[in-house]
Amino acid sequence: MLMRGSPSGRDEAHVVKSAVRTLEILEFFDEVRQPTNVVTVSEALGYPQSSTAALLRSMVAMGYLQFDAKARTYLPTDRVGLLGNWISPPLFEDGALLRMMRAVHRRTGQLALIAARNGDFAQYIHVLKQPDAIAYHIQIGMKRPLASSGAGRVLLAASSDGEVRSLVHRLNAYASSDAVRIDLPELLNELTAIRRRGYCVSKNRVVDNFGSIAIRLPAELTSRPLVVGLGGRTNVIEERESDFVAIVREEIARHLVRPCGEGGPSVSFAAGHLQPSAA
């Protein structure tokens, strides 16, 4: 297993180490989904074994982990699953969002993820991938710049052009070189296209021969913008773009959208449903 290290884009000056490690332990269990011992957690996350053991014992005492004394392993309890289930009920009640993600992952055979905006970044908050997948560079918690990533641009498409101009002006003011400066006209044109078709295709931006498709969840379903992403080899993304987009939309409708009259939101996936906020 790869050492997670510090996710790209994390502002180390504004995080408390013990809090970060506690949350990364929960994210680690979300990835491995099996009982795990102290040594495995320590090596996977790059923490000292003594502090890892202390954190795990504390999480057991708080009821978030259970400890198997015979096997010397830890596993999250049901209390973890109950956290946050009151947020955006159409997404999280009865595990609807995760069922949708598993269906997309199974039908496409590609990496599937959920991304949300965190400041000037798109952050991966859930990732499903095969152990031998090429997308080793994508992990839960990692961040990608809003203006230069597929998921980020879909999230940014929910903003008005005026908000985008302000963001780009600020980011370019701190750019270390012309190579990382953002081309505002190009970005605005791309955001217009994303709003029209409802998704973004990104190719070879971070890793050669890797591409992605990002589709925003309908605004009616969530209290903040969220994006469903698919990632795989560039040639596969190119060849099956329309199929993948259709599959994601079908599974969103199947798992997250209730028929009219059942108390849930009714969502249309017609092109152009991504509308920016008022300037």
Image (cartoon, helix red, strand yellow):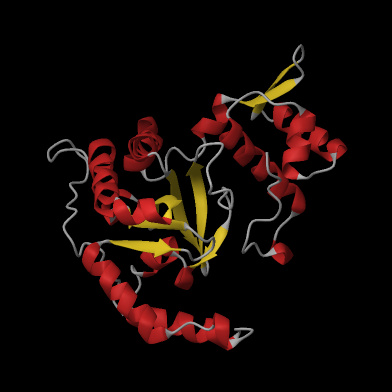
Query: Could you say where residue 16 lies in the image, as x and y percent from the top left?
Result: 74, 55
Q: Nearer the viewer, residue 174 or 128?
A: 128
Q: Is residue 117 visible?
A: yes
Q: Residue at coordinates 58% horizontally, 53% vertically from top-left?
A: 137
Q: Is residue 69 above or below residue 47?
A: above
Q: Nearer the viewer, residue 65 or 228?
A: 228
* Residue, far left: 261
For this view, does 128 lie left or right of residue 58?
A: left
Q: Nearer the viewer, residue 87 or 169?
A: 169
For this view, does 46 lie left or right of residue 179?
A: right
Q: Dividing the image into 4 quarters, which one contains the N terminus? A: top right
Q: Is residue 170 above or below residue 222?
A: below
Query: Could you say where residue 222 lies in the image, as x and y percent from the top left?
Result: 34, 51
Q: Residue at coordinates 54% horizontally, 25% vertically from top-left?
A: 78
Q: Residue at coordinates 43% horizontally, 57% vertically from top-left?
A: 211
For this view, does 131 lie left or right of residue 18?
A: left
Q: Is residue 226 visible?
A: no
Q: Dividing the image into 4 quarters, which one contains the C terminus? A: bottom left
Query: Could you say where residue 9 lies in the image, as x and y percent from the top left?
Result: 62, 64
Q: Nearer the viewer, residue 17 or 168?
A: 168
* Residue, far right: 50
How many badges with numbers are in the image? Answer: 0
Q: Residue at coordinates 41% horizontally, 56% vertically from top-left?
A: 234
Query: Could you say where residue 266 lies in the image, as x and y percent from the top left?
Result: 17, 46
Q: Is residue 251 above or below residue 151?
A: above
For this view, does 205 lie left or right of residue 104?
A: right
